Amino acid sequence: MRQDADFFALTEPDLIYVARRLREAQALEEVLTQAGLDYLVEPDLYRGGFIFQSQRIGAFFYVHPDLSAQARELLLRNGYKPYVGTGP
């Protein structure tokens, strides 16, 4: 279920995915909700483009660190490539 930032106040949530399009974000929300996973989604900036790079706004999906492996596996099963890195 989609949660607000207060839900994750006692932990540092784990970034699992950055959706670059609204339709993609909505579809991923449906996948996570159907699976019963608590998640946080927030807009944030990312760099996009190859030749002409620019800052763009995306939907950043986070889960509790204890659910990170389960969420990443769920993403893979549904055709999403989980975020791998140290931050946005």
Image: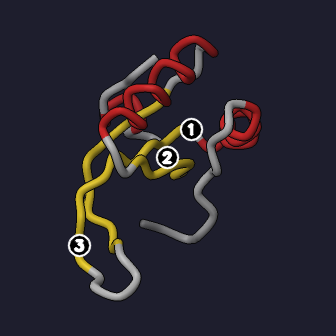
Q: Indicate the quadrant where residue 23 lies.
A: top left
Q: Position of residue 6 (x, y in %)?
A: 31, 32
Q: Please provide percent x and percent y for residue 15.
A: 51, 52
Residue beneath the point at 38% across and 39% down: 9
- Spatial separation of the CA atoms under disc 2 and disc 3: 23 Å
Q: Marks 2 and 1, Cα distance to the nearest angstrom?
A: 5 Å
| Mark 2 or mark 3, earlier in chain | 2
Of the pair 84 and 48, the residue shown nearer to us: 48
**Nearer-N-terminus badge (2/1):** 2
* Residue identified by numbered label 1: 64
Do the residues under discs 1 and 3 have CB atoms within 8 angstroms?
A: no
| Label 2 CA crowd tier, 10 Å (few <14, some 14–19, many 20+) | many
Query: What's the residue type where badge 1 is placed?
Result: His
Image height of 30 relative to 43, above or below: above
Which residue, given by chain and number where applicable, does mark 3 sit on? 55
Q: Residue at x 55, y 23 (%)?
A: 32
**SS at badge 2:** loop
